Amino acid sequence: MIRFTKDCVLGVEEIDKEHEHLFKLFNDAITILEYDYGEDKYYKIHNILSGLDQYAENHFMHEEAYMEKICDPELILQRVQHLSFKIRLFEFLVKNIDNEKEQMEALRDLIDFLSLWLYRHIISSDTMIGKLPPLEEWMLRENPCEYIEEYITGVDIIDREHRILFETLERAFNLVKFWVEGDSYDEIIHILDELKVCTVTHFADEEEHMQSIGYEGYEAHKQAHDAYVDRLDEIDFDKIEENPKIYLESLIEFLMGWMIHHITNFDKNIPLI
């Protein structure tokens, strides 16, 4: 079972209630798979799929309307991800589940799909809604990528690696701030490659520390890490080449916003011992 914890809370009552309902549907699917032995599961599975279909129709509309209202820069990405959810759900809705073998297979596939969605979409994307300040506001700061006391966790290795990540992001930020047309593409690629290596190394070290102290929030934390790395993997280098300044502005806005949000709301909850 997966609990709807504060890690998954956006802070918008209607959206949070809908997310919590999705967690219930997921747990219902697990219950059917693990405890309903030797009985036909056809109608129970279809009830869950119908619930998911209604969830997608209502929740995505509410979430996108809220993002549009606050001019959230991640709206387009959210719409793409929501569409992918609906397409995958349709595949489940038309799937043949007449016999027990097909029902068990459908349940396992559905649980795997929802598990990734719950953590990689809700924790990685949805919890960031309304928390990414517009790039124009960042420009007004002396150094928006400065590693300040607010980000210190007290765990030496984590804090050292966070500082390196902030310094790498600052180099990317300065490319935007002091942009010179025509000669920055190779440097962008180099910084992004370096950022990914540093990020993967840091997440591995942080996860090792959490496991060494038996941190109960490890699994959700790791899922958030995996989602962030996925986002780095999804960087469109063709779009960078087409218009590097605009693409990099949007990318930095997300990467920096995610890092600050993750450190202050997740990493600082990791016990010191």
Image (spheres, rainbow, N blue to C red):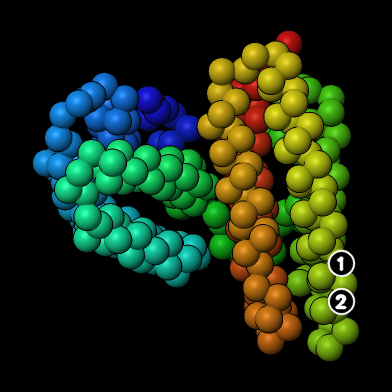
Question: To which residue does mark 2 refer?
Answer: 186
Vertical placement of 164 versus 143: above or below? above
Q: From where the camera sits, is residue 132 visible?
A: yes
Quarter assignment of residue 226: top right
Image coordinates of residue 129 in percent, x first then y, are 45, 52
Query: Which of the image's four quarters has the C terminus?
Result: top right
Task: Give the residue drawn at x 62%, y 64%.
Answer: 234
Quarter assignment of residue 85: bottom left
Task: Give the residue drawn at x 56%, y 56%.
Answer: 133
Q: How crowded is mark 1: few (under 14 residues within 10 Å), some or many (20 or more)?
A: few
Residue sitting nearer the eye, 271 or 170: 271
Query: Which of the image's four quarters has the N terminus?
Result: top left
Vertical placement of 158 versus 105: above or below? above
Mark 1: secondary structure:
helix
Q: What residue type is labelled 2?
A: Asp
Count how many numbered circles sit on residues in the image.
Answer: 2
Task: Give the residue drawn at x 82%, y 61%.
Answer: 193
Cα distance, mark 2 to mark 1? 6 Å
Image coordinates of residue 23 in percent, x first then y, are 32, 35
Query: Left or right of 47: which side holds 103?
Result: right
Q: Are marks 2 and 1 in contact (CB under 8 Å)?
A: yes
Q: Residue 190 carries which label?
A: 1
